Amino acid sequence: MRLVSNIAAMQRLARKWQRAGTRIGFVPTMGYLHAGHLSLVQRARRAVGKNGVVAVSIYVNPTQFGPSEDFSKYPRDLKRDLKLCRAAGVDVVFMPGDQEMYPKVGSSRRNDRTARRAVPTGFSTYVVEDKLSQTMEGASRPMHFRGVTTVVAKLFNIVLPDVAVFGQKDFQQAAIIKRMVADLNFPVKIIVAPTLREHDGLAMSSRNRYLTGNLRPQATVLWCAIQMARATVKKSKAFPAAKLKAAVKKLIECEPAAKPDYVEFFEPDTLLPISEVTLGTHMALAVFIGKTRLIDNAQL
Ligand code: AMP
């Protein structure tokens, strides 16, 4: 397995593979890998075949974190990640540093003082999706998707993948990436792979590591909320979204450490909110469990 942290070196390698007709499958991650990430690696391998190559990027992207979010605390364990990648048959891990991705050329003293996450003055071009990113995660985390689309566009230009695999766990993110690829004509096929869950239904996430003590059992409330909504629409053909939203929020608030951020019912292609929930409607929710913000989604 090759380890590459330099952009030019990664592009050279990708071009070499392209010239040889080798298909490149790509899984972008922020590291602290779990079985959900590794399922995307397997999906990428399946997509490119045994003669193709699978690239994984490990990069905690500062531009997608808000000022009061967990960028500096985000869990990192590169040694363990590399071991997992090697065992999963990854061909190359691209792991750039912040200076490589967002050069601080000409950075001002003001930026230096506003912590490591400060927007570097050597970088000023962003990719913004303007429609699908307005609701849910976009409404709760302003600038988040601008950071995501920008870094994914950069990574696509560096890794030059034929296929990239994203998780349905971040449903809105996957929808926005698909839109960006279509709108800006990136020659990449986007595959969205299913959410891997713990035995009790909690969606796997690097942030689950924050769930210590009695917070962990309370985190299953997201999955319970989805099950409850599913059972409700199974019983009655159409159910008013506002009423179901209120019922789901009430269920969540039964857990002492849980605080709902949003619960949405929407049309999966447009992400537009719907007023009558039926079987097939998509549901997404974000819930604080203590200080940890978790998200989940499913088709009902
Ligand atoms: P992250 O490292 O959290 O940025 O995630 C990297 C990729 O893994 C994204 O495409 C996520 O949607 C995907 N992912 C995260 N958690 C899961 C999961 N539990 N199951 C499947 N894919 C996941």
Image: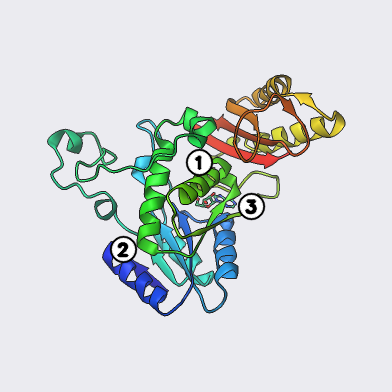
Residue at figure coordinates x 52%, y 71% from the top left: 87
| Residue 282, position as x, y percentages in the image | 68, 37
Question: Nearer the viewer's eye, disc 1 or disc 3?
Answer: 3
Q: Quadrant of the C terminus?
A: top right
Q: Secondary structure at mark 2?
A: loop
Q: Upstream in the sequence, badge 3 or badge 2?
A: 2
Coloring basis for residues? rainbow
The answer to whether 222 appears left or right of 133 in the picture is right
* Above or below, 22 relative to 180: below
Q: For mark 2, what is the residue?
A: 5
- In the image: residue 55, left or right of residue 269: left
Q: Tell me the element at label 3.
A: loop
Say which mark, if any, is on residue 233.
none
Pointer 3: residues within 10 angstroms few (<14), some, or many (20+)? many
Q: Is residue 70 visible?
A: no
Three-letter residue code for mark 1: Tyr
Amino acid type of the residue tagged 3 in the rendering: Leu
What's the residue type where badge 2 is placed? Ser
Q: Nearer the viewer, residue 51 or 18?
A: 18
Q: Earlier in the sequence, mark 1 or mark 3?
A: 3
* Label 3 to label 2: alpha-carbon separation: 29 Å
Sequence-first tag of 2 and 1: 2
Taking depth in this image into account, of 147 and 203 the one nearest to the observer is 147
Q: Which residue is mark 1?
A: 210
Q: CA distance from mark 2 to mark 1?
A: 28 Å
According to the picture, the residue beneath numbered tag 3 turns out to be 196
